[in-house]
Amino acid sequence: MKLVRRLLAVFFGLPVLIAVGMSLVDAYRRRGKKAKPFPVTPPGTVPVGGGSLTTYTFGDDLFEDMLKAIEGARKQIFFETYIWKGDDVGQRFKTALTDAVARGVEVYCIYDTFANLVVPPRFKRFPAGMKVLRYPVYPAGWRFFDLSRYGRDHRKILVVDDEVGFVGGYNVGSAYADEWRDTHVRITGPAVWDLRRAFADFWNLNRRRRLGASHRPLLIETTPVWEPKVRFHRNVPRLWMFPIRSMYLEAINRAAKNIWLTQAYFLPDQDFVDALKDAARRGVDVRLLLPLKSNHVVADWISRGYFSQMLDAGVRILRFRDAMVHAKTATVDGTWSTVGTANIDRLSLSGNYEINLEVIDEAVAAQMEAIFERDQSNCLELTRAEWEARDVHRKFTELVLTPLRPLL
């Protein structure tokens, strides 16, 4: 048993030590560095599903329209974010929401406490009229044995007056305004009701423990319209609901022409990798766009452990230069598209609260393909020869970090 314990300690302990060391070194190297300019696609709007859909690929454009929507609110605002920085952009949102409360608008806010530990406490003080749910650092309570209660709230949602909704990968902060390449969408029409319901369901699932039993549930009407072109898929770990992974796999398995994925972090399970490989082998144009260097160096190294088998199968791997690409998008066969908050990793697909928009519409798919092609113009493609030529220490590091895959 001693030998077994020692082997386990080495098997898991060594990767953890290496990962911590790599993270510290990377953080030191990044001090003071800023992203370089990168190509962006201007906001574009297309009609879809009885309403419209607008795509954003630059934070400044998105934040201006989100703030404009908040400033024009008359009745109700639902605002939910994973990261809410206490900087200039974060303060603009806080001020806009505070002003909305002052003019009589009903404002509900949710943010993840763990993701905002470094935000000054004074920033997280809100006016009494604002209803705020702080999703806790440790959400399991005394049910430490219940794995369904450990998921983070990784969603980013804004809904204003039942009329307009925003969802996608952007957190709120100054760096995300012009240094990160991300994707968000603005929707109008019947689909806004589903986004409202997603917010209300999360609020009601957590209100008693976080706000107290005296707080009434957030009740909203349901829309009588079922929109076949636009759907929201929500991961709800508390209820063991994880439909986003299935949504991706179904689209990948049906693909006949192309699969273009943009991901901030790519740490899938083997079944997901196999689905992409199978698609490439049957002649589908499979492209995976990732950051050349993300903000999580360990995730980058673990992701590389999948590259050999994907390159062998014919999957093209494109690496975005000069800035962090944080988008979570895909488009298939000029018809199917998704934009959301879920990364292709175990934390997002089987751990966190996430939400993805699924759209079956050729105009939206054309828009997503145009965005992908613009991003690809700023990428370095990884060739098989380049990958095989990497040195021994890189291969060793990739191998040593493999045991961490199930944790990320």
Image (cartoon, helix red, strand yellow):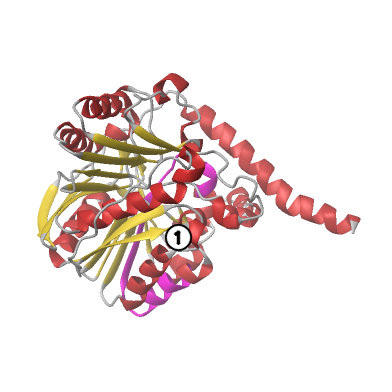
* Quarter of the image with the N terminus in it: bottom right
Give the number of callouts: 1
95 to 255, vertically: above or below: above
Chain part drawn in magenta: 273-299
**73 sits left or right of 307 in the view:** left
The reply to whether the magenta stretch includes residue 298 is: yes
Label 1 CA crowd tier, 10 Å (few <14, some 14–19, many 20+):
few
SS at circle 1: helix
The picture quadrant where one finds residue 141 is: top right
- For this rendering, which residue is in front, 22 or 263? 263
Q: Position of residue 329 (x, y in %)?
A: 31, 56
| Residue at x 39%, y 47% (from the top left corner) | 203
Q: Position of residue 259 (x, y in %)?
A: 30, 67
| Residue at x 48%, y 35% (from the top left corner) | 113
- For this rendering, which residue is in front, 202 or 172? 202
- For this rendering, which residue is in front, 317 or 154? 154
As drawn, the residue found furthest toward the front would be: 214
Task: Note whether residue 389 is visible.
Answer: no
As drawn, the residue found furthest toward the top would be: 122
| Residue at x 39%, y 71% (from the top left corner) | 249
Residue under circle 1? 385
**213 sits left or right of 13 in the view:** left
Q: Amino acid at mark 1?
A: Ala
